[in-house]
Image: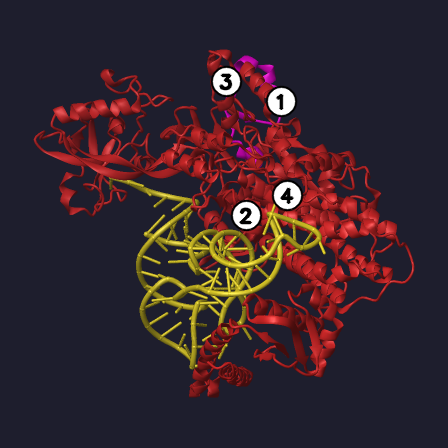
Amino acid sequence: MFPKRFDYQEAEPRIYRRWKDENAFRTAYDSQGNLQDPSRKDARPFVIVIPPPNITGRLHMGHALNNTVQDLLTRAKRMDGYDALWVPGTDHAGIATQTVVKKQLDAEGIDMRALGREETVRRIWEWRNKYGSAILNQLERMGCSCDWSRTRFTMDEGLNRAVRESFVRLYQDGLIYRGKRIVNWCPVDRTALSDDEVEKEDEKGKMYHIRYPLQDDSTQYMVVATTRPETLFGDVAVAVNPKDERYAAMVGKNVVLPLQGRVIPVIADEWADPEKGTGVVKITPAHDPNDFEVGQRHELTPINVMNEDATMNEVVPERYRGLDRYACRRKALEELEELGLLEETKDHVLAIGRSYRSKQPIEFRLSDQWFVKMGPLAEQALAASGFTKGGDGWQKTEPGDLSLHPSRFDKVYLHWLSNIRDWCISRQIWWGHRIPAWFHKETGEILVDLEEPARVKAEPEQWRQEEDVLDTWFSSWLWPLSVFGWPEKTPDFDRYYPTTVLSTAKDILFFWVARMNFAGLRFDGRLPYRHVYLHSTIADETGTTMSKSKGNGIDPLTLIDGATLEALKQPVMDARPSNMKELLKRVEKNFPNGFEAVGADAMRWTLIYSITEGENVRLSLPRFTEGRNFVTKLWNGAGRILTSLEAETVLDGPIAPMTEEDQWLLARLDSTTRVCRACLEDFDFGKMAQELYHFVWDDYCSWGLEWSKTRLTSQDPAERRAALKVMGSVLADLLRLLHPVVPFVTEELWSLLVPQMNRLGLWLDDRPSSELLIRDHYPKPRKEPQLELERRIGIKQDAISLVRSVEASGSVESGDFTLVATPEVKGLLEGAIREINQLSPRKVVLADRAPAGTVAYPSAFAAALHFVPAPAYVERLKKDLEKGKKDLASSQAQLANQSFVERAPKEKVDEIRRREAELTTTITKLEAELRSLGT
RNA sequence: AGGCGGGUAGCUCAGUUGGCAGAGCGUCGCCUUUACACGGCGAAUGUCGCAGGUUCGACCCCUGUCCCGCCUACCA
C-alpha cells in the first residue's frame, strides 16, 4: 500500500544527509585545482556566490526566496551538465554583531569599553564561533545544495588580505581619502553610518520660529524657522536669499544668538529659500550637511556643540552641558519662551533618519572619516554594462557584459550610478577589518600599507594605527573576488571567477551589487558576474513588506517544522508593533490550532510559483498549503504508477505499440521541457512553476493517468507494460524537471521509480545516468511540436468534457450517450472509446444513427451527442440559447460595421463570418429543439 | 519633489506583433468511483482604476488624472 502522503519530516533530513554523504554538491575540481569529479572534467562552470547572510541573522522569507532561486539555478545547471558551484558563506555584520555581544556584556554587568578592544573582539569571535553559522544550518533545512567545503566568512584571514589589498591600492590611486565631513552619526553605537544604513521615515515633529535680535537694535529681530533649536549654539550665521527683497537691507548686519549672546553675521546665500519657513535660515555647519557647504562658501568655522553620544558639550552655556539633545531642546525652548523669543510653534511633519541598527535618530556630525571616491568607479561600471555617455547623459546603447533581470532595473541602476556620492567607509567600532593606516603622532603623517610599515616598526612609540574599522560593505564588495582567494592567483580563482549569476533582493542593487561591480572592474578588470537576478520583496497579505520590526514576517521554519499558536504569536509579541492587538487577533482567528508543517518542498514551491515581475509578492501562511497540496498530488500521481510497476511480474515479451494518447503525453512533456528550459534562461521562474503545475495536475494526472488506467489494469501484459513504459518514463522526466524546485520529494520518488523501471527494463529511451536524481541529467525535448496530434486529442478531450458537462446539468433521464459523428471524427473517437468511457460518468457508444427516443444536443462539437432527455434539459438549452444569441449579436454588430469589413484583414473578417454562420446554425437547432420539447 | 513599479473575478496574479478576457485559491452544486477529500466532476463570477485620444477594432499604443507600493532627494 503506497503511503497517501509524502512524509517530509522524516524524509527531508534523511535525503539531505545522503546528498552530503555522497558529495552531491561538489564541483569538478577542489579548491586546490585537483580533479575530484572526472565526469565533469570538461564541464563549463556555472557559479553563484551567495549574498552572505549576516551572522546574527535568522532565516526569513526573503532568504527563503532568494536561496530557493539560487538552489534551483544551481541544481538545474548541475543536472544540465555544468560544473555547478554555489559558494556559501556569512557576513560579519560589524555594527549588528558588536551590538549583540555588547548587549550580552551589558547583561553580565561588563562595560565593553572597560573590557578593551582586544578582549571584546575575542569575545565576539567566541560568539560567532558558537552561533555564527545558525543561518547556514537553516539553509540546509531548505535543501540548499551549496558546496559547504568552500564556506567563507567575511572576516576570514584570506578575506582580510583582500580587504587590505584593495584599501592600499585605492589609497595609492588616490581613490581613498580622509577628510572632515558631515556624516550620519549614531549616538548609541557612536559610529558613523553610510547613507544606506539610515532609514528615513516621515514623523510628526514641531517647527519653531525663533527671534534673533539685531546687534545694533535689540528691539528688532530676524525670525528663524527651525526644527532643531538645540543646535542653535552651533550657529555661525543666519542666511537669506540674495534675491529676497524683504531682507536685502539686513545682509551684512549682525544678529545676537539667543541664549548664548554670540554675535553672528547675516549672510546672503542661494541655499536660503524664500518660500520656506520665514525665508531666514540658521547656518549650523557642524550639524547639517547643507549648512556645512554654506559654511565653506562663506569661510565660516563650524562649531560642534555635541559629544559623541549626542549630549551637549563644553561649547554651550554651562547649564546646558551634558544634557541629552532632546533635554537640551526642551530647556532651550522654555528659556526662549521666557525671553519672549519663541514666536511660534507649529506642527510639522519631517523625515527623521534613524540608524537601521539602534533605531535612534541619527545626528549629523562633523568628523574625520575615510571615503572612497565613487565617480571614476561608477563611470567604469556604466561603460562595462553597455552605457555610453552622450550629449544628454548616459544611455544604454549595447547589451554590455552585465544583464539585469528584470531588465527594467537598468534604469534604476543608471539613475543611481549617475548620481553617486562618495562612500564613507570608516566606522568607529571594533568588530571589523581595521583600517591599515598609521598616523605619526606629531607630524600627522599618514602611512597606508598591507602590513605594519617598517618605519612604524622602527619607532613604534611615534605612530599609532587608525582605530577605525571599515564599513562591512567594504568586505562585501570584494565577496565574489575574495571567496576564490583573490588577490592570490589561486586555481579556484582561475576556474570559477568571474561567476555566472548573482541573485539578490532588489533593494541592495545599489549598495552591494553596484559596488561589487566597481570592485570587480577596478581590481580584476572584469565584472564579477554575467547576470544579476533581482527578486521581489515579500509582503504579507495586506501588501506590507514583511519585517521583523513589524512582526508580520513568516518564519520559514514554521513552514518546515510547523508551529503552535503560541509560537505563531511570538514574532508579533517580540516586535510590539502599533497594531499588535489586531495582528494577534488575526493570528488567533486564522490559526487557533497553530500551523501544521508543510515541508521545505512546499515552501520552495509556493515561493517560486508566486514569483512575479512586480515590485513585491504577497504571501500568507495559507498560501503555502497550496504548495503542500501540489507536492501531495505529485506524490499520489507518481504513487499510482509505482504501485503498478511494483506489481508487474512480466519481465519480457511483446510490448503494445504506443497509443495516440501516449504520444500526446510525450508531446506535452516536450512542450513543458521547452518552456522550462526557456524560463531558466530568461529567469522567469514563476512561469516555469506554473507550466509544471499544469503538466503535473492536468496533463499527467487528469488525462495521462486516467487514460492509462484501462491498460494498466489490462489482462494483456503487452498493454500493461506499454502503459508502464510511457508513464514511468514520462514520470522520470517530470521528476527531473521538478527537482530543482522541489528537490526532496522528487529525490524520494526517484529512488522508488528507478529500481522498478530498471527491473522491468521499461525505459523509453534514456536510462538514468545516476542513482541520485540530483546528479541525473536535465531533460531535452524528444520531438518537434505536434500540432495535429494536439488537435486530434483535443477532440477526444472535448467529447469527454461535453458528456461530463451535460451529465452534470442533469439533462439526461436514463440510458447511454450515443455519439453520431462524421467519418473522420468517428475514426478518432473509435480508437479512444475505451478511454472515453473510463472518464465518462455514463456509458458512451458510437453509432451511425441516433437511437429512438433520444435528442441530439446542439453544440459546435464535431459529433452529435444523443441521449434520453430529462426535464432539466430544457434549462440547459435555454441557457445555451441565451449565450448563443448574445454572441451572435456581437458578431453581427461587428459585420454591420462597414469600416470593419473594409479595413480589417480579410482573415479576421472571414473568421467573424464563419463564427456568425456557426452560431446561426446552433441557434436554429436550439430553437427547434426547444419547440419540439413543447416550450 | 523626482524615478521605478502596480491598479484585470471575492483573494493572489497571468495576459507581446491590438482581434469575443485567463489560471490558482476561495465560493456554489454533485461525488467517499479501487492514486490522491491535501481529492474528482461540473458551475457561477469581470464598466480590465478613471477620463480623453489614435484605430475598423484598445486590458494592450498615446495623453491626462486618481489611488497603492518601493527607491532617491529635500523638508527652515
Q: Position of residue A931 (x, y in %)?
A: 49, 84
Choose the circle earlier in sequence order: 3 or 4. Answer: 3
Identify which amino acid the numbered label 2 is placed on. Answer: His
**Which segment is the magenta one?**
A447-476
Badge number at residue A9:
none
Q: Is residue A626 shown left or right of residue A727?
A: left
Q: Chain letter for mark 4, please.
A: A
Separation (CA) of disc 2 from disc 4: 19 Å
Q: Is residue A412 shown left or right of residue A823?
A: left
**How is colour applied across the structure in the image?**
by chain
Secondary structure of the residue carrying tag 1 is helix
Choose the circle earlier in sequence order: 2 or 3. Answer: 3
When asked about the image quadrant of residue A434, the answer is: top right
Q: Chain letter for mark 3, please.
A: A
Q: Are marks 1 and 2 on the same chain?
A: yes
Q: Are marks 3 and 1 on the same chain?
A: yes
Badge number at residue A129:
1
Q: Which residue is label 2 attached to?
A: A535
Choose the circle earlier in sequence order: 4 or 1. Answer: 1
Which chain is the one coloured yellow? B
Secondary structure of the residue carrying tag 3 is helix
